[in-house]
């Protein structure tokens, strides 16, 4: 019989007696060419339906990513209900419009809108964390998120306000609290994740990022002034302070995306995964900053020169590297996970998407 | 329609209660899917099962009604089994993995974007413009005027009696609610703008360029046409829509909406809008017993002033690329019919 699974499936000798964890790397089988098809069809249908299809598009995209990601021979899956996502997008758009327009109408309306947002947003963000976890599965078991409302207000309201009022000096602590909240209350089936993150690690990452960012700003400033000066001596038009400012800001965003983002995201991914445990299992993430710089830079270049058509290929390249950098260090058999009690899959399935399900991208 | 036990497909079966994989075999018996593993077996009517879309090398998933599922990586064998069961993939799936459809989609997308920008957006903006609350129009216009004053124009140096006389004349000649502002043009030279709430801005240079008051009034009639026909508001709505779509597509640049007022200055009106505003001015001037040829003369003067001055593209010039054509149209129909 040629069942390829018989070779890897149990019964197998228990390798855990020796105490050395078994390495189970995450594998990713997505391909740029395949994803391009999904991406373009999604895009066309989203345009034709004036954006309504984008919720269904998101589900298909996440399903493609999840199902092409495997651990120990089994794929992940995504079960999100597009209707909940559409609802989340409409809510998000309304909130964004309200926030942007209310202050133009009157100061008081602006303040009332802001207060309303402050009350509503933490709850919505908590629910969307729950939505995303609950709709992800591996081997038929759903992930879950049990974070509470009180902590949501602390993480999504108190800490952001504190960090703004301290000129972002406390922002690294905010991020530490956010990541802790996100993972400490997460579980796979009935098994809880645990995480230990030190504030000092975040300060270290953001300290370096700040230095790189300042260098990027200076570089942008010098480059823009140079270009403008050169153009000025050629007698080509006059540069207004507005144009100059816009050029500096634009270039700075580009440099930030190229120089700061790869560093921060590499370090953050490693920090979070290397300090995360799931029952007896640990994780290891080995994203290299250098490699991420290379991928980001070439992706941007190719995307610009293909007028955006390279974007799906870029997404796959980046995703493959980030996913395949993660390894699960199994401290026991992976077959032992159980579903959360009273939470069988059928009952939480798509058919019963409850009224308060929303998904708002962070 | 059946496959036989000998053609069974390898699969991993999960019961939905534990993460334990069961190496299983799948095959079809009539309308029933049979599954067998070392320690379990089940038969389910094909109708009760859900099959995941094909997604490249990703496994296909068969979901059972009780929350169990089977993971299948033997794609060719499984495709044959599906064919026998009468299962048909959704159209969107077939499109996404067929090169011809993908190419056609790229073409269709470009066509849609082009047609949407050319006709769809202006059409929608024209319909939405009357629905925008007066309060919002005023707020945006105030913001735009502040922005113009801050970055573009200087206070006027005209005599107070000149400005008062022009304001009085204009007020007597139109019912459209408006406010007249005079500013020194600086980089934009001889120019005039209209904001959606009826604020009209005239530069000192334009007043100096005009041979008499009537020439200024003729230009202002054209600007009032932009106000009355809601051209500024429509351009702004279109600009905001594009910004919103770009934001959605390229990720978030959170304050894009706040930049909306700048569209009034940055992007001129469309040619059609200019023609409509000319036509509006022509009809009003004729009704008042004046000659639209005055506006035509003024157009020519403005065009040549900007040409000679060598000023960069600005309001009247950039949005009035076909001056000769417009002058001709105004002169041709400058007599009452
Ligand atoms: Zn005009």
Image (tube, coloured by chain):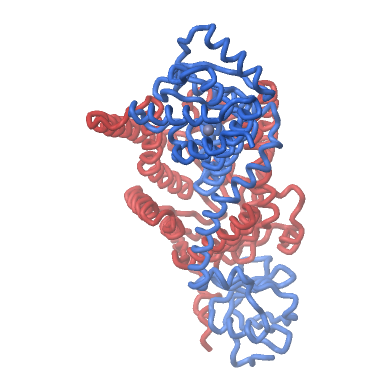
The quarter of the picture where the C terminus of chain B appears is top right
Give the camera-side residue of A257 and A356.
A257
Q: Quadrant of residue B89?
A: bottom right
In percent of width and height, residue B128 lies at 67, 41
The shade of chain A is: red
In percent of width and height, residue B208 lies at 44, 17
Q: Which chain is blue?
A: B
Rendered position, B42 above or below B263 = below
In percent of width and height, residue B274 lies at 54, 37
Q: Residue at x 48, y 46 (%)?
A: A272
Q: How many numbered tags mark residues here?
A: 0
Residue A136, visible in the rendered structure:
no
Q: Residue at x 59, y 63 (%)?
A: A77
In percent of width and height, residue A117 lies at 67, 33
The quarter of the picture where the N terminus of chain B appears is bottom right
Is A68 positioned to the left or the right of A339 in the image? left
Residue B181, visible in the rendered structure:
yes
Give the camera-side residue of B42 and A258.
A258
Give the camera-side residue of A5 and A27.
A27
């Amino acid at each position: 019989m040629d069942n390829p699974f018989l070779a890897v499936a149990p019964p197998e000798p228990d390798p855990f007696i020796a105490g050395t964890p078994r390495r189970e790397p995450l594998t990713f089988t997505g391909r740029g060419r395949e994803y391009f098809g999904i991406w373009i069809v999604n895009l066309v249908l989203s345009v034709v339906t004036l954006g309504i299809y984008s919720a269904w598009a998101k589900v298909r995209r996440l399903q493609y990513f999840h199902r092409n990601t495997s651990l120990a021979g089994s794929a992940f899956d995504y079960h999100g209900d597009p209707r909940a996502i559409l609802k989340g997008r409409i809510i998000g758009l309304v909130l964004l419009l309200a926030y942007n327009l209310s202050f133009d109408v009157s100061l008081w309306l602006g303040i009332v809108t802001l207060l309303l947002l402050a009350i509503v947003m933490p709850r919505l963000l908590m629910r969307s964390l729950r939505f995303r976890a609950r709709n992800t599965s591996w081997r038929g078991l759903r992930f879950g998120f049990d974070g509470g409302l009180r902590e949501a207000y602390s993480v999504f309201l108190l800490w952001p306000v504190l960090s703004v009022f301290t000129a972002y000096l406390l922002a690294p602590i905010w991020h530490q609290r956010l990541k802790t909240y996100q993972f400490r209350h997460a579980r796979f089936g009935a098994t809880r994740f645990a995480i230990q993150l030190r504030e000092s690690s975040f300060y270290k990452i953001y300290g370096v990022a700040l230095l790189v960012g300042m260098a990027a700003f200076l570089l942008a400033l010098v480059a823009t002034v140079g270009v403008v000066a050169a153009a000025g001596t050629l007698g080509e038009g006059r540069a207004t302070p507005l144009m100059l400012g816009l050029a500096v800001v634009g270039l700075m965003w580009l440099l930030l995306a190229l120089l700061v983002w790869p560093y921060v995201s590499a370090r953050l991914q490693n920090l979070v995964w290397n300090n995360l445990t799931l029952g007896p299992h640990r994780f290891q993430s080995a994203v290299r900053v250098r490699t991420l710089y290379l991928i980001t830079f070439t992706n941007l270049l190719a995307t610009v020169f293909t007028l955006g058509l390279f974007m799906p290929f870029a997404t796959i390249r980046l995703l493959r590297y980030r996913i395949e950098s993660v390894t699960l260090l199994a401290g026991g058999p992976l077959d032992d996970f159980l579903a959360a009690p009273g939470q069988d899959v059928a009952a939480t399935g798509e058919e019963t998407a409850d009224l308060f399900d929303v998904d708002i991208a962070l | 329609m059946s496959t036989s036990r000998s053609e069974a497909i390898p699969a991993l079966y999960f019961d939905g209660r534990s993460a334990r994989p069961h190496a299983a075999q799948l095959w079809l018996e009539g309308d029933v899917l049979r599954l067998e593993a070392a320690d379990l077996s089940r038969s389910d009517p094909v109708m009760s099962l859900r099959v995941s879309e094909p997604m490249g090398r990703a496994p296909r998933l068969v979901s059972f009604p009780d929350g169990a599922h089977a993971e299948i990586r033997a794609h060719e064998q499984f495709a044959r089994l599906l064919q026998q069961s009468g299962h048909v993939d959704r159209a969107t799936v077939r499109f996404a993995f067929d090169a011809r459809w993908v190419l056609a989609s790229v073409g269709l997308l470009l066509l849609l974007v082009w047609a949407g920008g050319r006709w769809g957006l202006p059409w929608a903006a024209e319909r939405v413009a009357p629905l925008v609350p007066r309060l919002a129009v005023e707020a945006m216009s105030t913001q735009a005027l502040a922005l113009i004053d801050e970055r573009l124009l200087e206070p006027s140096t005209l005599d107070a009696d000149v400005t008062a006389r022009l304001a009085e004349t204009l007020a007597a000649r139109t019912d459209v609610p408006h406010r007249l502002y005079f500013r020194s043009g600086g980089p934009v030279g001889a120019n005039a703008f209209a904001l959606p709430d009826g604020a009209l801005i005239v530069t000192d240079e334009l007043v100096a360029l005009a041979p008499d008051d009537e020439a200024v009034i003729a230009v202002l009639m054209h600007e009032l046409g932009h106000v009355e026909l809601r051209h500024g508001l429509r351009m702004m709505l279109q600009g905001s829509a594009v910004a919103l779509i770009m934001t959605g597509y390229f990720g978030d640049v959170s304050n894009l909406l706040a930049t909306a007022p700048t569209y009034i200055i940055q992007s001129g009106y469309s040619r059609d809008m200019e023609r409509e505003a000319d036509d509006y001015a022509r009809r009003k001037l004729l009704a008042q017993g004046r000659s639209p040829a005055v506006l035509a003369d003024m157009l020519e003067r403005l065009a040549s002033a900007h040409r000679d001055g060598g000023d960069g593209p600005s309001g009247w010039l950039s949005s009035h690329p076909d001056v000769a054509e417009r002058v001709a149209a105004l002169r041709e129909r400058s007599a009452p019919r």
